[in-house]
Image (tube, helix red, strand yellow):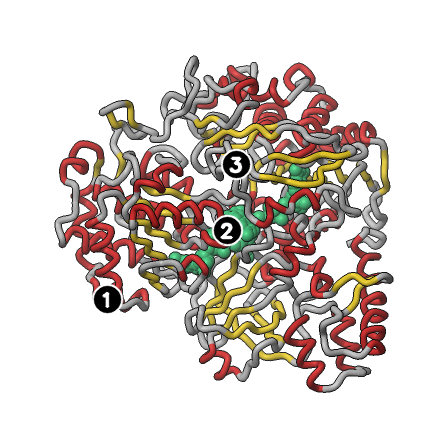
Amino acid sequence: MYLHVANGQVIKSQGDPEHPANQGKLCTKGATCAQTLNTPDRLKHAQVRTIRTESPQQVPLDEAISHVAQRLQRIIDLHGADAVAFYVSGQLSVECQYVVNKLCKGYLRTNNIDSNSRLCMSSAASGYKLSLGADGPPGSYQDFEHADCFFVIGSNMADCHPILFLRMLVARKKTGAKLIVVDPRRTMTAEKADLHLAIEPGTDLALLNGLLHLLVEAGHIDANFISAHTEDWEKLKPFLAEYTPAQVAEWTGLAEQDIRTAARWIGEAGEFMSLWTMGLNQSTHGTWQTNALCNLHLATGKICRRGSGPFSLTGQPNAMGGREVGYLSHGLPGQRAVTHAADRAFIEDLWKLPAGTIRSEPGLDAVSMFRKIESGEVKAIWIIGTNPVATMPRRAGVANALERADLVIVQDVYHPTETSRYADVLLPGAVWAEAEGTMINSERMVTLMQKAVEPPGDALPDWELVSRVACAMGFSDAFSYRSAEEIFDEVRQSANPHTGYDLRGIRYGQLRAGAIQWPCGPGETVGRPIRYRQENNLRFPTESGRARFFARPLLPPAEMPDAEFPVILTTGRVVNQWHTMTKTGKVEQLNKLNPGSFVEIHPEDAALLKIEEGQGVEVRSRRGVGIYPARITDRIRQGVCFVPFHWNELFGDKLAINEVTNDMVDPLSKQPEFKFCAVNLTAVAAVAGLPGKTQLLLQESTPFTADQIKHLHNTMAGLATTGFVSTGSGLGLPKETPFTPEQRAWMSKLLKDVFSDRSGTQSGNQPP
Ligand SMILES: Nc1nc2c(c(=O)[nH]1)N[C@H]1C(S)=C(S)[C@@H](COP(=O)(O)OP(=O)(O)OC[C@H]3O[C@@H](n4cnc5c(=O)[nH]c(N)nc54)[C@H](O)[C@@H]3O)O[C@H]1N2
Ligand SMILES: Nc1nc2c(c(=O)[nH]1)N[C@H]1C(S)=C(S)[C@@H](COP(=O)(O)OP(=O)(O)OC[C@H]3O[C@@H](n4cnc5c(=O)[nH]c(N)nc54)[C@H](O)[C@@H]3O)O[C@H]1N2
Ligand SMILES: [Mo]
């Protein structure tokens, strides 16, 4: 991406036509990102508090750094290294992810570091590792132009990977490739499909096994590939018998004919590509779903060749880079694991540590980490580039944990966020446009983010904040990096011949001219688009060199609907907002397009529950409750409702859907089941989503007619701040709405009262 800079400020962003991933195209969020760099809530200075009931005060950065170093050291001295934990992000640079992992696992000697990838890609990662031997997709985006059939399952690409989706649509126009979309909702992605399978949530394993059953039956199996490159096929085959089309149709709620059509298209396709994201990963069987999907490719031999393969679409910009440098609790740089003696020895060497320094047990995964803080076993947490109070399941437990902790360090670029409100120390990070650093996408393309402008105030690149704390703790021999490039050169030394991970041929100098894909060995100038294959020799990075089949039976999600909680809740994203909206929530154009939260409900469910369009609906689970305006639509299955997770407490009361979600995890990947829990729905009178006081006043002393209130319900419920326009004196109702000037003035005053209250709590004047 190019940034246009004037007077030291980024004024406009523009796509880079040479970049291999997007060829110059930007989505709405990329196109407007310049507006998010310099906002009033930008965190420009460090803040510290030593007394819990007070709010943090601005201090010089050096003071904050030595404060962090001393307090961490004291907690380690008193309680041991495992009393400290790090929770980091797939939105940080490779260099920051690497340095924080090195500090934690190598120097503090605890493996308690995990990242928001745990909520995102960890089921794909564990699934790949079991099926193929190493993490990451085996192919590249250029496969799009060569596939004859796309199988998109549990992914709303049109909204969440819009540029890639466009690339797929363009490719399909040329190649005539078929598109099958498996999603319980008729999303924008499903709308473009040749075949939409509106599956009953949580039953994808039945479908995947059922498709393989049909592929076998039709003889669409590559026996040569199976015998040359895989193992355990014979164990899988008998297991498939149960997954007859009739049985699968019953389990999945799909038409038998549609299942047969999908199998035929996959079987008859010359090249077959499958794409998936959170609809499969965020499940208590996410790893198994990845295995079952890989089974389809291995059985048909449609993998590791141009146009074919299983392809998980990574969510965050650098979650791939983070997984590669081992920023999950079991990982080490170069796709290595703490559980492998040889991997530990290699990294101890690289980090110049005595043998036996790195601990061999995986540390705490994200969900366990916050539970252990809640129970008092872990005393300190350093959170970098993620907003767990809004994005972890069962968020009330996360908030409790942060209240309970002795020390909460939050390194962010904005304040307040839902999480920064709990911080004892706030460290000001620089955003990507203000620092150098690399990021790696789903197809292993390494891109150098180049510095366009200076960070504001005392803000520093994230890697530098971490390195400076490490130096203050006495590790200056290992952390006196002068640049991100120096760190990258260390990362390059972690190449792994076993998995093919190899950045040795990639240097900052070349990256300045353009992105490069790994594997790229010494002396090479371009990467390779297909992994595991050298000319005609295909070898998977498992011990035997063969990929593995796994028999993965259909099991129910952790919490099934019952009489008390009869409806399935699934959660996810909208096209113009990003996660907790710390950036997109500030862009007027985006807020106009996706102004507020909502709950999607099927018309028949709505009729049964007497819920009207726009009316407030209480979504309640065993854990908590949220209130959202109803969006009644047949895009969703009966018995299922959908709520986006973007709007949280900074935007109004009772908006945080993670108050409601379940924190049960996949036993292998430890990824939580955000896509399935049991809820009940009740119509409520209040205008959902508006701050509590607004709701109350609207009911009590309103100068509005019944029709006007309905209008307010329909247009503004759930919008909180973002549903209003800014007027000279604050927020107000848009001009084109049917209200008198007096009513508008009344509303403006109300909003002023409400939001001046809220900004008081937000800026940390009161303890959380
Ligand atoms: N606009 C936008 N784009 C984003 C992001 C964002 O916040 N906003 N975030 C990025 C990140 S980090 C990620 S991880 C990706 C996520 O990208 P996606 O995974 O595509 O997005 P989600 O909306 O979380 O979920 C995808 C779909 O899964 C479906 N689903 C739910 N339950 C099931 C099920 O049981 N089976 C199947 N087959 N499908 C199911 C949902 O209906 C939904 O349409 O998006 C990335 N891109
Ligand atoms: N219910 C439900 N919950 C979900 C999901 C779901 O589908 N449903 N999806 C899950 C998934 S896939 C993901 S990836 C997570 C995302 O969850 P989070 O990562 O918690 O969400 P973000 O809003 O992206 O948080 C990023 C934080 O980092 C800050 N930040 C941005 N840039 C920088 C930087 O350069 N440096 C620093 N230090 N900070 C920065 C932002 O201001 C923000 O506070 O949410 C998960 N939670
Ligand atoms: Mo994600």
Above or below, 110 against 125 in this view is: above
Does residue 534 appear in the picture of this structure?
yes
Would you name the residue on which mark 2 appears?
Answer: 160
Would you name the residue on which mark 3 appears?
Answer: 329
Q: Are marks 1 and 3 in contact (CB under 8 Å)?
A: no
* Structural crowding at the residue carrying mark 1, measured as other residues with C-alpha within 10 Å and reported as few (<14), some (14–19) or many (≥20): some
Give amino acid for label 2. Answer: Cys
Q: Nearer the viewer, residue 705 or 132?
A: 705
First in residue order: circle 1 vs circle 3: 1
Would you name the residue on which mark 1 appears?
Answer: 256
Q: Nearer the viewer, residue 240 or 532?
A: 532
Closest to the camera, between mark 1 and mark 2, is 2
First in residue order: circle 1 vs circle 2: 2
* Label 1 beta carbon less than 8 Å to ligand 1: no
Does residue 362 appear in the picture of this structure?
no
Give amino acid for label 1. Answer: Glu
